[in-house]
Image: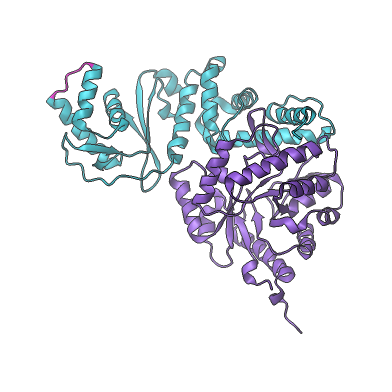
Chain colours: A purple, B cyan
Amino acid sequence: MTNDDDILVGLGFRRSIADETIQMKGSSPNFVEIAPENWMGMGGYWRSKLHEAAERFPITAHGLSLSIGSPDELDFEFVKELKKFLDEFNIDIYSEHLSYSKCDNAHIYDLLPIPFREDAVKHISKRIKTVQDILERPLILENVSYYTPVAAKMREEEFISSIVKESGCNLLLDVNNVYVNAFNHDYNAKDFIKNLPLDQVAYMHMAGHEKVEKDLIIDTHGQPIIDPVYDLFNYTLDLTEPVPVLLERDFNFPEMEELQGEMTNLKKIMNQKWNKAYVVDE
Amino acid sequence: MSLTNETKDIQSKLAEYARTGSKKEIEGARDDRLHHYRRLVYNVVKGVLDQGFPIAKEIMGEERWDDLVFDFFKRHKCQENEVWKMPSELVEFVDKTNYQESIGLPYLPELLLFEWLEIQVHGMQDVALPNTQEFGSDLDEALVLNPYLEIAQFQYPVHLRSASEMEANKGHYYLLIYRELDSHLVKFMNLTGFTAILLDTLGQSPKTLRHALNEMGQSLGMEITHEIEQKAIEFIEKMVEKGVVLGVK
């Protein structure tokens, strides 16, 4: 039976709210998530803040620069440095984006969509295995938001499922990204989720977004989670086993009480759906 | 099965567009949506550089600064995995391309370096510090320097942060940029040519003040007098107060 220990809600550990997060009172996160590239190779003030965070919270990592979908060769030195960093902070959960952010030997510093194609499935699956071997951890890949398909020869959910099956990696299900993509590309979000390899979901993200055009949403992480995304989260939890869930907020930070309120909302839904002990008999 | 050339080519076109703004037809992509990638990528890069170089940005003005950022990301292939280190690549780019000549700001490379050094020293990786004892104002004690420091030589007084002051006062400037151990704050200090070389000599490996002065005397062809030794001791005492010299071994 699921118990309270399995209901884990985390918060993105960002510099703008570092002190508030470390000193948070009341309902505080069960863990914090960092982007390792924002802390790797860095000492001094921010390193000390990261250590303070690590003393209070378990840490998960959500990478930015692995560029698993890149046509370029993997940056092995980077992956080795990453492993050292993950080891130092006892980070077991390391996730990345199913996208690419480096190409033709140039970093782009943002996430570009991969063509949904069979050759990309094989290419990425092979790279996932290599990365997992070096890191000695499972790689958890996130379904990313994207604003245009690129030379697709298969459906997105087929692409994701094929990679998960071929590589054996885990899935970070970003529920907000599913909502964003369903809106932007006019598909049914619930059907999309139903067709994912849900038994491989190891982690989830929830976030806000911004509608910039009448038919386009940008995944900004700068707004509160909206009700339709909560609804989709509710739906998703009926189909999945308990996993840690992260509230992502990257800028436009509100008072901490607002973020705590969002974490409480998530936890309430998770308890209702996943924690059988939470159900009280009449 | 490896990635086909066709898929590689498509990925390359999208990445190039996002990086440079040069648009080529991309199969299956929505033309009305592609520009968002260019916008989002450019905003990330500009945001990082705006934050890293506030003085250069203010002096150059929004338009010239934007042109520089645009040119940099288009012509330079960024190598840093950690985006916080990416500003160092702008410093290299301007230096390598003599960008300052095209816009008539001769002090620009040094100003950018000055601003980058603040970021670099602030983020220098932590190292284990040796146990030290108090400096006894003795020439024969092996000095231990704060490991978080840089000594830079400039032709322009970039630390004055004023365009008119920089242009009007070309000369020789030596600057110490260091991080305080407890507060982690980055501090700046003007040095003379002599004290800059002395600190640099001491920083190369732990050595006594006498050893460092003798090295300097040999390399500069100067006699190290008793007066110079006393001045050097006074300087080190001041550096101990500031936390630049941690003590003696």
Q: Is residue A195 above or below residue B94?
A: below
Query: Residue B61's image quarter?
Result: top right
Instruction: State the residue at coordinates (85%, 33%).
Output: B28
Looking at the rendered image, the quarter that the C terminus of chain A falls into is: bottom right
Q: Is residue A158 above or below residue A273?
A: above
Residue B138 in percent (x, y) is at: 15, 37
Query: Most extreme residue toward the left, as rendered?
Result: B226
Query: Residue B70's image quarter?
Result: top right
Instruction: State the residue at coordinates (68%, 45%).
Output: A97
State whether residue B49 appears in this view: yes
Which span is picked out in magenta? B221-225
> Is residue B212 located in the magenta-colored stretch of the structure?
no
**Foreground of the two, B57 or A278:** A278
**Foreground of the two, B228 or B126:** B126
**Foreground of the two, B12 or B229:** B12
> Is residue B224 located in the magenta-colored stretch of the structure?
yes
Residue B94 in percent (x, y) is at: 54, 22
Left or right: B245 with respect to B230? right
State whether residue A114 appears in this view: no
Instruction: State the residue at coordinates (82%, 47%).
Output: A158
Left or right: A41 with respect to A234? left
Left or right: B61 with respect to B162? right
Residue B144 in percent (x, y) is at: 27, 39
Residue A239 in percent (x, y) is at: 79, 63
Instruction: State the residue at coordinates (45%, 44%).
Output: A43
Query: Residue B17's image quarter?
Result: top right
